[in-house]
Image (cartoon, helix red, strand yellow):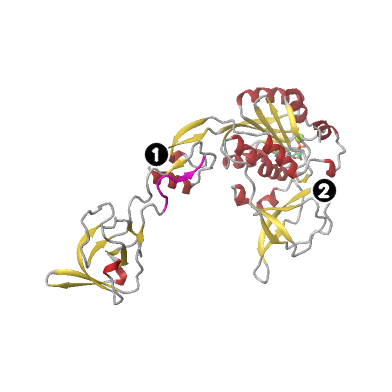
Amino acid sequence: MSRKALLDDCFLHDKDRLRHQEALEILKSRMSAVADTETVRIEDGLERILAEDIAAPRNIPLADNSAVDGYAFRHSDFDEAGGFFRLQQRIAAGHASDADLGPWAAARIFTGAVMPPGADTVAMQEDCETHQQDGQDFVIVPQGLKTGANCRKAGEDVAEGTTILSSGQLLRPQDLAAIASTGQAQVNVFRKLRVALISTGDELRRPGDLITVGDVYDSNHFLLRGLCATAPVEFEDLGILKDDANLVEETLRKAADRFDVILTTGGASRGEEDHVLQALDTLGRCHMWQLAIKPGRPMMFGNIGSCVFLGLPGNPVAAMVCFLLYARPVLSVLAGGSFLEPQRFQIPAAFDVPKKKPDRREFYRGFLGTSDSGQTTAHKFARDGSGLITGLREADGLIEIPEDVTAIQKGDPVTFLPFSGFGIR
Ligand code: AMP
Ligand code: MG
């Protein structure tokens, strides 16, 4: 489909608009990492995108060690009746012993302490009895322990040389723990993307300002700030732009020199008061506009020189849906990560939709419930208006209805995209 067809036809039918999957293909094919890399301490690595592969330089753990507080012994000394062992040494965590365990001997050992040479099995202290005879301590170990019980082997978490993390991975708390376990104190990560946030509309006011009839508070700015906080970006608020063609063009031109990405909301249609698309056309290129989805039809993707342009619709529901589906994966790729796909679960619908328009993909605000039989079901927020922030708050995620579906009956499986899969709650 040519770009001209995409841009010029205001009376396009859904079947002629770009489909969700086609939009994703365009975004995937035109995008690569733009961010440089920098080195940070691992304590500053959370939610950053790794720019190196990390391998274990040695076994983790380094040596065989006890998983419990108890008694370490040689399993071959054990017979079916259990064991009666001379207590020979005491080994605490951080105090490895290199003394060999003699035959029929056991070592008092604590969780994390290195196994003494010769020992291969540990009995838990709760299961053992100690006993003194002629000034010598003994321990009685019950039967039934397998060789190697309660002993953690060297390298059982990660064997020396194994790659544990690859470039492009988003660092989670458990990843930082893994890096720390290799002994590495710093990591090479991609620099955060510089993103300009712009709201557009004569009617918009910031919270704290007075409003009169016809004005609307700029909720999207705060929505997008929050969404950006879950992405590897640092953003700057460029405020609210009046619906003035020259002002919009001038602001975008200047921002394109300073930012990796410009993220706008509003003014994205072809109305006389919508100037964003025109400005993008003048300053750079629009690669995508007008999608066959609901909500969120006017979603722009383009570039002004090396700056990527993402133009979200003005209605808050559409802005959030388009951010999650399109802007989020784009920001991830530009920031050195992967093209993030949402998690999808098939869940029976708890609602009917007697008639849905074909040829477009719809995203309802959805929340989970439980049926009388205890099954998880997907509920739809009852009202569809794309200005209803209430529905976004009620939802646990989005329900995705494909283009070819024209009706839904209670019990039909529907695709549920939990917000948690988008990194939000
Ligand atoms: P537009 O895309 O500019 O035509 O705006 C579509 C609808 O979204 C209008 O009702 C706007 O008032 C509303 N809107 C646009 N921008 C915002 C915003 N930043 N916050 C809340 N509502 C907005
Ligand atoms: Mg507007």
Kindly report the distance in space between the C-alpha atoms of the residues bearing marks 1 and 2: 52 Å
- Specify the amino acid type for callout 1: Ala
Which residue is rendered at x = 45% and y = 45% of the image?
A: 176
**Residue 361 at least partly seen:** yes
For marks 1 and 2, the one nearer the N-term is: 1
Q: Which percent across, then down, holds residue 27?
A: 69, 37
Numbered mark located on residue 185 in the image: 1
Q: Residue furthest front?
A: 76
Q: Residue furthest bottom?
A: 81
Q: Quadrant of residue 33?
A: top right
Q: Main secondary structure of the magenta part?
A: loop
Assign the N terminus to one quadrant of the image: top right
Numbered mark located on residue 359 in the image: 2
Q: Is residue 159 magenta?
A: yes
Q: Residues within 10 Å of mark 1 (few under 14, many from 20)?
A: few
How many badges with numbers are in the image? 2
- In the rendered structure, the answer to whether residue 259 lies left or right of residue 2 reads left
Task: Please give the range of residues in magenta.
Answer: 157-166
Which residue is rendered at x = 22% and y = 68% of the image?
A: 104
Q: Quadrant of residue 115?
A: bottom left
Q: Residue furthest right?
A: 11
Q: Residues within 10 Å of mark 2 (few under 14, many from 20)?
A: some
Numbered mark located on residue 34 in the image: none
Mark 2 residue element:
loop
Q: Quadrant of residue 328?
A: top right
Q: Which percent across, then down, holds residue 420?
A: 60, 51
